Image (spheres, grey):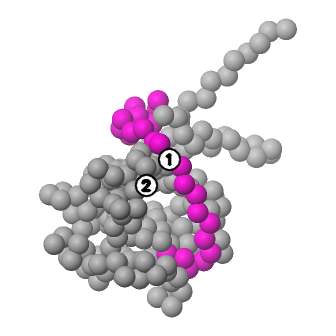
Amino acid sequence: MRTRTFYYFFDVKKTATAIEGVYILEPRVFGDERGYFFESYSERDFCREVGDIHFVQDNESCSRRGVLRGLHFQKGDHAQAKLVRVTRGRVLDVAVDIRPGSATFGKWVSVELSEENKLQFFLPRGMAHGFAVLSDTAIFQYKCDNYYCPESEGGILWSDPDLGIDWQLGSDEVILSEKDKHHPLLKDFEK
């Protein structure tokens, strides 16, 4: 009997956003009556297509509708690049450029991530990150290229009027942690 070997390669459409280095990644999904298959990550191909990033930690959260997590970041040597996706439900994912000297400092971009569209969002180091759950529940997964360090965490207030982020939720729907209620505004963070 002859043996056949099949190779699957990272097959993804990369879309640049208005912030340099932030990309929306759309995998090629193979589906039939049995279901679907797609390659969600290949380090070799990711490094070739996006950058020489080596992820060291995977995280997952489960949240209910209205939960807003963010805007979070890690400072200095503990800054993190992230590759995020949703495996159940639907979220609005947001990246805010907080890189000093960046032409897009203080600008934000967003994308809806869902189990249906299977999109991924890549954020380089120097982004504040947050997401809001738009479905009844959502499972959110992300890879980080640096380990979490509690002493280096920071945040920006989700409702900063200078940012003006449309989270696609009414303010009465938003559910925040105590920590996320008290982050500084971007203008205060700059100081």
- Residue 2 appears left or right of 44: right
Magenta segment, which residues? 44-68
142 with respect to 14 (left or right): right
Tell me residue 133's x, y (percent): 55, 72
Q: Residue furthest bottom?
A: 172
Seen as rendered, the residue at the extreme right is: 1
Indicate the secondary structure of the residue bearing disc 2: loop
Q: Name the quadrant containing residue 91.
A: bottom right
| Front residue (pair 139, 38) | 139
**Label 2 neighbour load within 10 Å: few <14, some 14-19, many 20+:** some
* Amino acid under disc 2: Tyr
Query: Is residue 12 at least partly visible in the picture?
Result: yes
Which percent across, then down, holds residue 174?
51, 83
Which residue: 43% across, 77% down?
A: 179
> Quadrant of the rendered structure where residue 167 is?
bottom left
Residue 30 image-quadrant placement: top right
Q: Residue at coordinates 50% horizontally, 47% vertically from top-left? A: 57
Residue placed most toward the observer, 57 or 170: 57
Reading the image, the residue beneath label 1 is 57
Mark 1 belongs to which amino acid? Gln
Residue pictured at 43% horizontal, 55% vertical: 148
Q: Is 64 inside the magenta-drawn segment?
A: yes
The x and y percentages for residue 183 are: 34, 78
Q: Is residue 179 left or right of residue 187?
A: right
Residue, disc 2: 148
Foreground residue, 113 or 140? 140
Q: Quadrant of the C terminus?
A: bottom left
Residue 116 sits above or below residue 5 on the image: below
- The answer to whether residue 15 of the structure is visible from this angle is no
Compared with residue 160, is residue 85 higher up or lower down, i.e. above or below? above
